Image (cartoon, grey):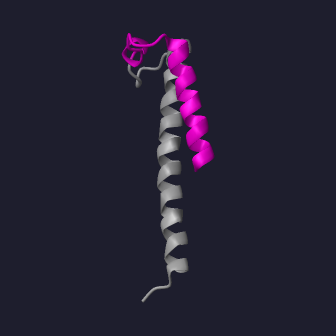
Amino acid sequence: MVAEGSVLPSIRRRYVVVLSLLLSVFCLRVAAQMLQPMSPVAWLPPFEAWVGGGLPYWRLVLCQVLVIMVCGRAV
């Protein structure tokens, strides 16, 4: 039987790695979204594809930054 104390840190470490990876990918997506209108690159979708009609762009970016801050604090 494995002691409970030795299993929990291993599981937590995996969660931290996975959540950090997902947060990093989301941060890259937000950065690419902000880069596209200023300096368009061919390998990213056009700016219009990033922005839907639901929120003004500045609110979308603000919400995404808030999500990054909350997730970063949790990780």
Residue 45 image offset from top left, x and y in percent: 38, 20
In the rendered view, tell whether residue 12 sits above or below residue 6.
above
Residue 57 belongs to the span the image colors magenta = yes
Q: Which residue is farthest front?
A: 4
**In screen coordinates, is 50 left or right of 38?**
left
> In this orientation, which residue lies closer to the viewer: 39 or 73?
73
Residue 46 image offset from top left, x and y in percent: 40, 15
Residue segment shown in magenta: 46-75
In the rendered view, tell whether residue 56 sits above or below residue 15.
above
Residue 25 belongs to the span the image colors magenta = no
Q: Quadrant of the N terminus?
A: bottom left
In the rendered view, tell whether residue 13 sits above or below residue 66.
below
Residue at image location 50% in from the left, 84% down from the top: 3
Residue at image location 48% in from the left, 67% down from the top: 11
Quarter where residue 5 is shown: bottom right
Q: Which residue is farthest bottom?
A: 1
**In screen coordinates, is 52 left or right of 66?**
left
Residue at image location 54% in from the left, 33% down from the top: 67
> In this orientation, which residue lies closer to the viewer: 44 or 67?
67
Residue 13 image offset from top left, x and y in percent: 53, 64
Please tell me how many numbered marks the rendered image carries. Answer: 0
Residue at image location 58% in from the left, 28% down from the top: 65
Main SS of the magenta part reads helix
> In this orientation, which residue lies closer to the viewer: 46 or 30?
30
